[in-house]
Amino acid sequence: MIAEEGSSLNVVNDNKIIIPLHKPGLKEKSFFLLSGIIVSIPITFFVNIFSNHLCFLLPVFYSELCAVGIFAPFIEEFSKAYPLFYRHGETEKSIFILGFLVGLGFGLTEFFFYVFGGTSVYIRLPGLFFHAASTSITAYGIATNRAVPFYLLATALHLSYN
């Protein structure tokens, strides 16, 4: 159960814990923006190392298509949602905003990697906002206790975007 905003944690008669709602402040929002950079990006790199080895028997073109087109969306969407799973007592709006910030942090990092690697800013700019939006979709699923369908929706959109 969820309590009203500002109330303390209470145990009621049925041994149910009431978690108070709260509105995330600037520090918490900054934490989630940074989580997209310092948590989600390393997880993505680490898991991508293993996923690239799953496609190694294929010719180079198909190996890249497999790694970037199939595995990357699943890995990236999970990595971006990972910092959100421990949140309790958040309203749908607040967890949606925190999801947006995690995705924005991830998107900013990816944007700079590609732009400093020689890709045009104009080509990478939509991806920056796409990551924020797709993580918001998954965050909404987490907030409404329907994480898997919304994660799969975000992943399907990511597959089509790639």
Image (cartoon, grey):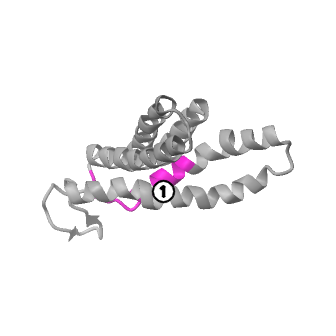
Quadrant showing the C terminus: top right
Residue at 86% from the left image edge and 50% from the top image edge: 57
Q: Position of residue 69 (x, y in %)?
A: 67, 38
Q: Is residue 38 magenta?
A: no
Q: Nearer the viewer, residue 82 or 146?
A: 82
Magenta highlight range: 76-90
Q: Amino acid at mark 1?
A: Ser
Is disc 1 surrounded by few (<14), some (14 to 19) or many (20+) residues within 10 Å? many
Q: Residue at x 68, y 41 (%)?
A: 70
| Residue at the far left in the pictured view | 6
Q: Residue at x 47, y 51 (%)?
A: 80
Q: Secondary structure at mark 1?
A: helix
Query: Label 1 belongs to which residue?
Result: 40
Image height of 156 relative to 67, above or below: above
Q: Please give the name of the residue rendered at 70% of the width and 59% of the height, measured from the top-left corner.
A: 50
Residue 77 counted in the magenta span? yes
Q: Is residue 23 left or right of residue 101?
A: left
* Vertical side of 57 occupied by 27: above or below: below
Could you say where residue 46 lies in the image, as x and y percent from the top left?
61, 61
What is the magenta segment's predominant secondary structure? helix
98 or 126, nearer to the observer? 126
State how many labels appear: 1
Q: Where on the picture, by quarter, is residue 24?
A: bottom left
Residue 58 in picture, x, y percent from top left: 85, 45
Percent x, y of residue 53 = 77, 56
Residue 112 visible to the viewer? yes
Q: Quadrant of the N terminus?
A: bottom left
Q: Is residue 21 shown to the viewer in this render?
A: no
Q: Nearer the viewer, residue 18 or 92?
A: 92
